[in-house]
Amino acid sequence: MLADLLRTAYLFLPLLGGAIANGFCIRFKCLTFLTYPLDFGLTHRQRRVFGNNKTFRGIILFSAGTGAIVSLQAAVFHKIPKLQSLEIIDYGIINPPLFGFLMGVAAMLSELPNSYLKRQLDIPSGAAGHGLWLPIFYFLDQVDLLAGVWLVLSLAMTVTLGHVLFSIVFIFAAHQIVTVIGYLLGMRHTIR
């Protein structure tokens, strides 16, 4: 069981590269011309579709960072026997930079339905809501990216229920740590 959790964590490790790339650009105000909102400021029912936090810069940088780490796994980590034993996908059947980039795009696009729903419920960007909505959106905010990532991963591997469950545990736990570190380093606007 621990081996399966470690293998799933290794599979999702590239997403941390995406978060770091995006976080550094937020912190150091890089590529600000890409901070245009994905919803172009459009509204539905007098509410923003996604809000200002979902930007072209976020998708591009998160995807590029994810692609860079998948490439690193394939080119460098693959040569280390202990790390090779953690691999679930065969790097020989994918184009690592492109595959990682697609993982990042899918992750970011998977967050949009959650953002849309929160805007329609008048929950501000970066907030999880209140009352009954708080635990629901807090959980969704941590794991919503998994749907798209698993769609991309299914192109290169057989997806099992165990993999999906382990990914939920890993992403939920990792998100808590990355969020706090990102906030302390000025890469995030909120600590949640």
Image (cartoon, rainbow, N blue to C red):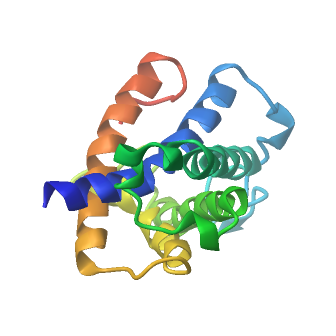
**From what the image shows, is residue 90 above or below residue 17?**
below
Quick check: can you spot residue 136? no
At horizontal 77% and vertical 26% (from top left) the residue drawn is: 30
**From what the image shows, is residue 46 above or below residue 123?**
below
Q: Residue furthest left?
A: 1
Q: What x and y, as percent, mark residue 41?
A: 75, 56
Left or right: 68 with respect to 16?
Answer: right
Left or right: 6 with respect to 95?
Answer: left
Q: Residue furthest right?
A: 33
At horizontal 39% and vertical 47% (from top left) the residue drawn is: 81
Quick check: can you spot residue 100? yes
Left or right: 103 with respect to 135?
Answer: right
Image quadrant occupied by the C terminus: top left
Label count reads 0
Image quadrant occupied by the N terminus: bottom left
Q: What x and y, as percent, mark residue 66?
A: 60, 49
At horizontal 34% and vertical 52% (from top left) the residue drawn is: 9
Q: What x and y, as percent, mark residue 168?
A: 28, 61
- Front residue of 117 and 156: 156
- Front residue of 187 and 138: 187
Q: What x and y, as percent, mark residue 34?
A: 82, 42
At horizontal 74% and vertical 44% (from top left) the residue drawn is: 57
Left or right: 75 with respect to 73?
Answer: right
- Front residue of 65 and 120: 65
